[in-house]
Image (cartoon, rainbow, N blue to C red):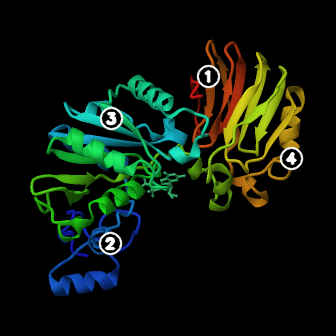
Amino acid sequence: IDQDLVCIGCGAHIQTSNPDELGYTPESALRKGLESGELYCQRCFRLRHYNEIAPVNLTDDDFRRLLSQISETDSLIVYVMDLFDVNGSLIPGLHRFIGDNEVLLVGNKEDILPKSLKRPRMKEWLRQQAFANGIRPIDVVLTSAKNRHEVNNLFEAIEKYRNGKDVYVVGVTNVGKSTLINQLIAIRNDIKDLITTSRFPGTTLDKIEIPFDEESSLIDTPGIVHREQMAHVLEPEDLKYAAPQKTIKPRVFQLNGDQTLFMGALARFDYQRSNGPVVAYFENNLNIHRTKLENADQFYEKHAGELLTPPTNGNFEKLPKLIKHNFSVSEKSDIVFEGLGWISVPAGAIITGWAPEGISVITRKAMI
Ligand code: GDP
């Protein structure tokens, strides 16, 4: 393809080979677009005609370049995180890219967290997590894009804090950014007539602008791929046991010291010193198996991929081997298996957490 062909909506270079990347246009649409003189990439085409934002992936370098452009703008930044995978939602160095702009923090997938968890507390907790990473949000909104919960509130918060400025929506892939934006668009149902006319064609590379009013836009930036997500080490058929579909039911284990929990064959939790029960927060259908610590190595060797699933049979061979991480905690904490879930442990616990190579295990202040 001619290198100079760009989408008149977002300015991305048109390509016909990779549907997941910027500027993708099916061959047939490319021909039509050239004939009519209105060449849109598939993503902008969908936004124009169906009011739908499609997710797109960027390389790390492209993403950094894009973020650094944001620091030069005068705008409101809406930062979308996945409440189930807060650590996996962090954008490395985001605080440097914000410039002087204010950040409105969104904790999405609220529907997945137990009802017993008080929302004001959860907001405060999320704010603290952001603080620890150098972000000082002006406000926190919890949403469920899936259930359209609190999306109106988010819309109002955006209107309140943006003060007529542009709005940049940022987030790593999979946090629900596209779903959320689609709903914000639906709220502005009069937007149909305005959509995707870039104010600076060819210069607003890689981002989709959705006009808010005559002067300002909501700008969807592509998500950065977090390679350390569970989603990248699991086959799609096994992913349904890792990614929660419904509200998590906490599972309590009255463990003595020297006991082990296996989360399928995906993760392992060794309770070296017990100070009371632990509570596990994982997909409700994920099989959690308890053994004695002293038998755990053998047990895994013998049963991983069979009694211990997921991964289901054939896929176990493809799973990276489990790597261990040691912790001792002085306050009530969560041991987080990134993207898979967490186990909350009492103060004074000594734990070894195991996860497939490349997947982090961390501790944080207990969410609940
Ligand atoms: P993006 O990559 O950030 O644009 O994320 P998507 O909007 O494509 O969503 C990623 C996945 O999360 C999809 O499977 C969505 O159905 C799911 N999802 C999005 N929002 C929610 C939510 O509020 N709750 C739940 N449970 N799932 C959600």
**Cα gap from disc 4 to disc 3, whole angstroms:** 42 Å
Residue 351 visible within the image: yes
Mark 4 or mark 1: whose residue is earlier in sequence: 4
Q: Nearer the viewer, mark 2 or mark 4?
A: 2
Q: Are marks 1 and 3 in contact (CB under 8 Å)?
A: no
Q: Quadrant of residue 268?
A: top right
* Mark 2 or mark 4, earlier in chain: 2
**Residue position marked by numbered label 2 in the rendering:** 46
Mark 1 or 3, nearer chain start: 3
Residue ID at (46%, 48%):
175
Q: Earlier in the sequence, mark 4 or mark 3?
A: 3
Q: CA distance from mark 1 to mark 2?
A: 44 Å
Q: How far from the left and from the top, in percent, is residue 168?
A: 25, 47
Q: In terms of image quadrants, where is residue 240?
A: bottom right
User: Which quarter of the rendered picture does the N terminus lie within?
Assistant: bottom left
Name the residue that disc number 1 marks.
333
Q: Nearer the viewer, mark 4 or mark 1?
A: 1
**Residue tagged 3:** 94
Q: Which residue is mark 4?
A: 303
In three-dimensional space, the C-alpha distance between marks 1 and 3, rounded to whole angstroms, equals 25 Å
Instruction: Give me the residue at 40% from left, 69% from top.
Output: 19
Q: Disc count in the image? A: 4
